Image (cartoon, rainbow, N blue to C red):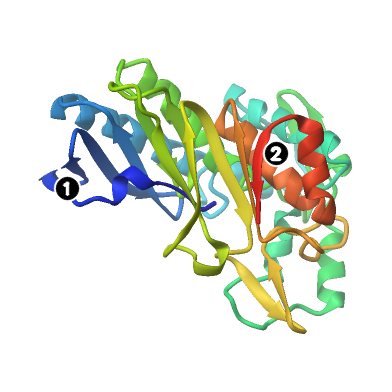
């Protein structure tokens, strides 16, 4: 996900750790979910900006702690280590499971939260190491949402299978943080978690926030597009940051759960604008999973999108 707020590129003055003034707004920064996180807020009130930053940070960290697959003290760990036993989940977890189940149906099985086990054999570090087909096939024996028993609020997965909310977790965190901030302030703001973002309306002078979309060929150094959007979510799926090289091809990190291999023929970058960050992120991912059919898929959804 490579969207960024262009307005944040100008130099500012430091007001406090993690918070600084830039022209007529504040920028707050922290790190969560293995990503740089940023809050832009159009206010002159430093106290207001600090409170909103604290809200964003606390919510991002809460969601990371609850749903990260790398922790040993949360609901995801409990589910993935239940050894075939049923697990009763809370309301929030059930909402995400229901959402993921809907995505599975929408994508004809291409979006599958049980496909995370494929990370056991794939490492997208820009190198040339590619797993054997035998090891991929061995992982695929543990992939397949239809094999999961889901009767809300009880989830039962077969031994050896896992669930992974990585495909929707960050976008969910953006929307949750944005909703909490909007309930506390009338100021316009942008929540940006690692390039997944939400813009909350026009600024005081009627301007939109300027959002830049990364050039996948010069990631972090150049923007291909400037988007001026008043309110909504933006997300990008692509191979700019996580990939491997194989037989002269660049293989992105988004895997086809039916083959266990990176999606064939997908664009370098797909950016979608939606009502929420989750909507944008879901559609950009589903489009990427279509490979060469990405553009047609998005046209059918009737959303704004940009493809490299």
Q: Nearer the viewer, mark 2 or mark 1?
A: 1
269 w.r.t. 189: above or below: below
Is residue 275 shown to the viewer in this render? yes
Q: Which residue is drawn at 22% across and 36% down?
A: 26
Q: Quadrant of residue 179?
A: top left
Density class for disc 1 (Cα within 10 Å; few <14, some 14-19, many ≥20) is some
Q: In which quarter of the image is the C terminus?
A: bottom right
Which residue is rendered at x = 78% and y = 48% of the image?
Answer: 294
Circle 2 SS class: helix
Label 2 Cα crowd, 10 Å radius (few <14 / some 14-19 / many 20+):
many
Q: Disc 2 or 1, which lies upstream in sequence?
A: 1
Residue 123, given in percent of the width and then of the height, sits at: 63, 71
Which of 278/302 is in front?
A: 302
Image point (34%, 22%), residue name: 206
Q: Helix or strand or loop: what does disc 1 sit on? A: loop
Compared to residue 213, the image places residue 275 above or below, namely above
Task: Give residue 133's position: percent from left, percent from top.
Answer: 86, 76
Residue under circle 2? 283
**Cα distance, mark 2 to mark 1?**
35 Å
Residue 48 image position (x, y, % from top left): 20, 24
Residue positioned 68% across, 65% down in the render:
252
Q: Residue 49 carries which label?
A: none
- For residue 130, what is the image quadrant? bottom right
Q: Where is residue 14 in the image (x, y as percent from the top left)?
A: 12, 47
Residue 282 horizontal side relative to residue 230, left or right: right
Is residue 252 found left or right of 205 in the rendered image? Answer: right
Q: Marks 2 and 1: CB-CB under 8 Å?
A: no
Q: Which mark is residue 12?
A: 1
Q: Would residue 26 appear left or right of 145 to someone viewing this image?
A: left
């Amino acid at each position: 996900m490579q969207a960024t707020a262009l307005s944040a590129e100008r130099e500012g003055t430091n007001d406090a750790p993690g918070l600084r003034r830039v022209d007529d707004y504040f920028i707050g920064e922290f790190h969560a979910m293995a990503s740089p996180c940023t809050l832009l807020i159009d206010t002159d009130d430093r106290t207001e900006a600090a409170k909103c930053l604290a809200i964003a940070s606390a919510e991002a960290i809460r969601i990371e702690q609850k749903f990260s697959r790398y922790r040993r003290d949360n609901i995801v760990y409990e589910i993935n280590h239940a050894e075939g036993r049923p697990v009763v989940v809370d309301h929030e977890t059930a909402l995400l499971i229901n959402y993921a189940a809907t995505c599975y149906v929408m994508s004809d099985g291409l979006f599958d939260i049980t496909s995370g086990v494929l990370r056991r054999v794939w490492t997208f570090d820009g190198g040339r190491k590619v797993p054997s087909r035998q090891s991929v096939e061995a992982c695929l024996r543990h992939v397949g949402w239809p094999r999961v028993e889901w009767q809300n609020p009880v989830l039962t997965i077969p031994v050896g299978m896992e669930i992974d909310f990585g495909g929707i977790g960050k976008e969910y965190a953006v929307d949750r943080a944005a909703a909490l901030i909007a309930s506390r302030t009338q100021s316009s703001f942008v929540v940006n978690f690692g390039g997944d973002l939400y813009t909350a309306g026009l600024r005081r002078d009627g301007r939109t926030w300027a959002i830049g979309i990364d050039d996948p060929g010069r990631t972090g150094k150049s923007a291909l597009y400037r988007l001026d959007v008043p309110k909504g979510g933006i997300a990008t799926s692509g191979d700019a940051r996580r990939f491997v090289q194989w037989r002269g091809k660049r293989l992105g990190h988004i895997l086809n759960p039916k083959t266990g291999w990176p999606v064939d023929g997908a664009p370098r970058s797909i950016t979608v604008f939606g009502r929420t960050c989750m909507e944008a992120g879901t559609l950009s991912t589903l489009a990427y999973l279509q490979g060469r059919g990405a553009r047609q898929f998005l046209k059918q959804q009737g959303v704004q999108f940009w493809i490299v």
